Amino acid sequence: MAARPALTRALPHLTSTVLSRSSQYQTSLRSISSLSPLSRTFSTTLPSLDANASTSTSSKPPTPDYAIPDPSRPTHFGFQTVTESEKREKVARVFTSVAEAYDRMNDLMSFGWHRVWKDHFVRTLNPGFSPLTAGPDPRGPQQILDIAGGTGDIAFRMLHTAHVVNRNPDVRVIMSDINRAMLTVGKHRSESLPASQQAALSFLEANAEDLTKARPLVPYPPADPASEEKPFFDPTTATTSIPDNSIDLYTVAFGIRNFSNIPAALREAYRVLKPGGVFACLEFSKADKHPLFNAVYKEWSFRAIPLIGQLVAADRDSYQYLVESIERFPSQEEFRDMILDAGFVIAGEGYEDLTGGVAAIHKGMKPRT
Ligand SMILES: C[S@@+](CC[C@H](N)C(=O)[O-])C[C@H]1O[C@@H](n2cnc3c(N)ncnc32)[C@H](O)[C@@H]1O
C-alpha cells in the first residue's frame, strides 16, 4: 500500500492493527472513487456520486488513534525528531519570525511561481459557482474555510473570484490560522479589499488539528509591549468552534506540511465539511519524476533559499526549516492515500502536479449521505 511508507515515517507508533483496518477501508474507498464519473480536476461544482458510491460511504470513517493529537508523540520538524507539541511551538516561532517578510520572501524564493499556483488553485475551485446548490441558481450561498490562511493570499483570491468573477456576494470566507502574527498581517492587508469583500471575511485563531476550539482574532503583537501573550492560539482561550457539517469548501495552501499531526487535521476537515463538501490542498510536493529538473530544484532549495532568508529576512533557520519540511512531506501518492484514509473520495488520481511536481493540488470530497 502506497500510504504505508509515509504514515510509518511520519507516525512511528502506528500499529499493524490500525494499518490493516486502514487498508481495508482504503480499498473500499478506492473502488468507490473508481465508480465516480468525475474527470481529474474537480471543484465545488462536483456532480453527485452515483448511487453505489453514496450508499456505501455514508458512515463516518473510524478515527484511528494516530489521528488523535498526542503532545508527546514523536514527529518531525524539518530533519529533527521532536514531539507533536514541540513541533507546534517551533512552527509557531518560525511563522511569527517570518510574518512581516513572508509575502516578499515568497516572491523571491519561488520567482513569483507561488502566485501562479495560487491563481490556478482558486480557478479550479471556482468559488461562488456551484450548479449543485439547491434551486435553479448555481450562485447559491457558500461557506469557505481557509485553514492556515497566513497573510490571506488564498482567502482574498476566493473572495475576488466569487464576488467579482462569479458575481456571487453570498460567499463568505473564514480565514483561520494558529498564528496570530500571520493572521494580523492578513487582517491589515484585507483593509485594501472592497468593503463588500471585507464584510464577507472573518478571522479565526485555531489549530487545524482541533477545530472544536477557536477564537476570533485578537491581533498580535498586543498593544501593551510588556504583555506576555503568546503569538499563537492558546486553546484554553477558545470562545467558539467550527461545527460539524458546516463548511462547503475547505482550503489549505502551503500549510499542511507544518502541522504536527496531518491525519488529525484531515479528520477535522472531514468533520467540518458538509456531505458533498470539498477538501482542497495546495502544497509543495515531489518533482522526482523529472530527475534533471529535480536535481537543479533541490540545489536551489537547499543552497539558495536559506541564504536568501539570511540576507533578506535575517533569518536563516526559518528558511532552512522551510526546505527541510518540503523534503519531509509525503509524495503525491502517499498524501493522496492519507486523504482517502480520512474518508474522502477522490476523482481520478486525486492530485494535479504543478511545475513538474514542485507543488501539487490534492482534492477530496466528503461523500454524500
Ligand atoms: C507557509 S504559510 C501559508 C500561508 C498561506 N496559506 C499562503 O499560501 O500564503 C503556513 C501557515 O500555516 C500555519 N500553521 C502551521 N501550523 C498550523 C496549525 N496546526 N493550524 C493552523 N495553521 C497552522 C502557519 O501559522 C502559517 O501561517
Image: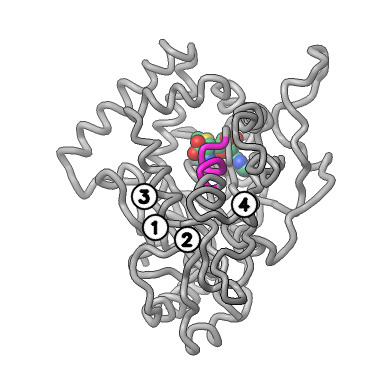
The N terminus appears in which quarter of the rendering? bottom left
Disc 3, SS:
strand
Disc 1, SS:
helix
Residue extent of the magenta highlight: 152-158
Label 4, residues with CA under 10 Å away: few <14, some 14-19, many ≥20: many
The residue shown at (66%, 47%) is 174
The CA distance from mark 3 to mark 4 is 20 Å
Which residue is more in the foreground, 367 or 318?
367
Disc 2, SS:
helix
Q: Which residue is mark 3?
A: 360
The CA distance from mark 2 to mark 1 is 6 Å
The CA distance from mark 4 to mark 1 is 24 Å
Give, as a three-letter code, the residue at label 1. Glu
Q: Position of residue 262 (x, y in %)?
A: 55, 51
Mark in the foreground, 3 or 4: 4
Residue sticking out furthest to the left? 292
Q: Which residue is mark 4?
A: 145
Disc 4, SS:
strand
Question: Which disc is residue 338 wearing?
Answer: 2
Q: Earlier in the sequence, mark 3 or mark 2?
A: 2
Q: Earlier in the sequence, mark 3 or mark 1?
A: 1
Q: Which residue is mark 1?
A: 334
Q: Position of residue 341 (x, y in %)?
A: 50, 66
Label 2, residues with CA under 10 Å away: few <14, some 14-19, many ≥20: many
Mark in the foreground, 3 or 1: 3
Q: Earlier in the sequence, mark 4 or mark 2?
A: 4
Give, as a three-letter code, the residue at label 2. Met
Give, as a three-letter code, the residue at label 4. Leu
Image marks 2 and 1: residues in contact by CB distance under 8 Å: yes
> Is residue 36 shown left or right of residue 82?
left
